[in-house]
Amino acid sequence: MRKLIENLKKLELLDIKSVMMLLVTALPALILKLSKKNIWLVCERINGAEDNGWIFYQWLRKNHPERNAYFVLSKGAPGFDKNDDHMLAWGGFRHYMYYQVSKMHVKALFVSPRPTQRVCCYYERFLKKRITTIYLRHGISVSGVEHHRYEVMRVRMFVCGAKPEYDYINQNAGYPEGYVQYTGFARFDELLDKQSDGRFILVIPTWRRYLVDIEKNDEENNKNFLASAFYRHFNSLLGNKAFIDDVESMGYKVKFCIHAEFRRFLPLFKDIDPRVELVKIGTSIHELLMSTSLLITDYSSVFFDVAYMKKPMVYYQFDYDEFRTKHFSEGYFSFERDGMGPVAKTEQELMDRVKACFDGKSFVNNELYLQRCAKFFPNHDNHNCERIYNSIIEIEKNG
């Protein structure tokens, strides 16, 4: 009791509502438990439904409707369907109720399908509530394991999207035997069936944690961003008339998608050519990747989705040493040795690499990179959700 009181003292005022919701839904949850067993809660972002969690949930509803699987999403978010009885409004009455009965949490990102993270952690600790967590992941890791170690994640199943990633995580991240599984990502199932040629080049770099300081105000962050290599290089590329002219002459256009963590900086890009299409908030990245003709990125793991479809790409890496020192350390993957496309370090080199992918009619991939794709994805099919499901069932059976 003393420990519980100490924990409650740490709660903030905003947490009182969460405590009350747990109390109010306790009795309905007990009644629910009589009729529904082995409830699975699936989620991604609080307001997002387009990634591995969403696609796996849809696969479950289609192929195993007998499963008590529920997707948690903010009411009013794109994809929320009030007519779907298996969809729970995040933080709502039913979410709290189903959470208390749930035994399996399936997540695609760090956030879990708890209605509130902190209060629920105290609740689970106090009642010794046992929940099995399946981590579907968002992107294939090519960097060091420090953010994926078992003592950090504490998940029962860590899903890998590729064989080399599985070997690296399994050997270096401290997981018990059998906790790391190479199944492929759920969203890969759609890539082979729905890919197309949208006649555009997608420019989609990742972010840099060292350029976003929550302790600094907007003016200071903007100043640091404007002085960064990231801003200088991408502002120059997207404003390069010769580059856009070249792309247009091939019969294509350019789309620029800035990372969500950098969206606040988009107004600072003053020199973007008016022919470049800026991807709007809410646009499905999954759909963009399936329809792009060629990808330009720096280090973003989205390139693996493009590689799974065997589409051409170019890596634009003008700040490799800085990125590895300040953002993510180097892991098992070498862009020069293992990359599914050429590496460019200057703007002119990037333009030359893009031209080299064009055969006069369309963008095509080089045989060397096709071989690397095949080696990286020995499971190259649309049965990834099925493998994930079978692995979860084994965990349910054997613990």
Image (tube, helix red, strand yellow):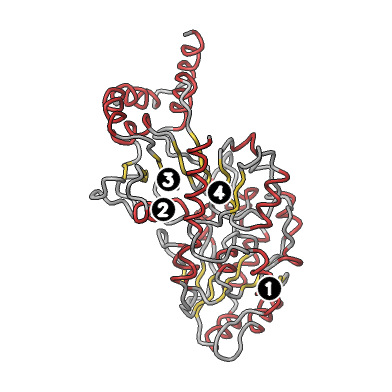
Give left or right: position of 324 versus 206. Answer: right
Of the two numbered discs 4 and 3 in the rendering, the one whose residue sits closer to the viewer: 3
Q: Which residue is mark 2?
A: 54
Q: CA distance from mark 4 to mark 1?
A: 47 Å
> Quick one: label 2 or label 1, which is nearer the N terminus?
2
Give left or right: position of 228 versus 62. Answer: right
**Splitting the image into 4 quarters, where does residue 35 fall?**
top left
> Quick one: label 4 or label 3, which is nearer the N terminus?
3
Residue flagged by tag 2: what amino acid is it? Answer: Trp
Label of residue 43 in the image: 3
Q: Say which of 194 and 328 sits in front.
A: 194
Of the two numbered discs 4 and 2 in the rendering, the one whose residue sits closer to the viewer: 2
Callout 1: SS: helix
Look at 51% across and 12% down and name the residue there: 3
Of the two numbered discs 2 and 1 in the rendering, the one whose residue sits closer to the viewer: 1
Where residue 317 appears, as percent x and y from the top left, is 70, 65
Look at 72% across and 45% down and name the residue there: 171
* Dots 4, 2 in contact, CB < 8 A: no
Q: Which residue is mark 4?
A: 219
Label of residue 371 in the image: 1
Task: Residue lying at the far bottom in this picture: please name it.
Answer: 360
> Quick one: label 4 or label 1, which is nearer the N terminus?
4
Q: CA distance from mark 4 to mark 2?
A: 37 Å
Residue flagged by tag 4: what amino acid is it? Answer: Glu
271 up-or-down from 115: above or below: below
112 up-or-down from 183: above or below: above
Where residue 300 appears, as percent x and y from the top left, is 60, 60
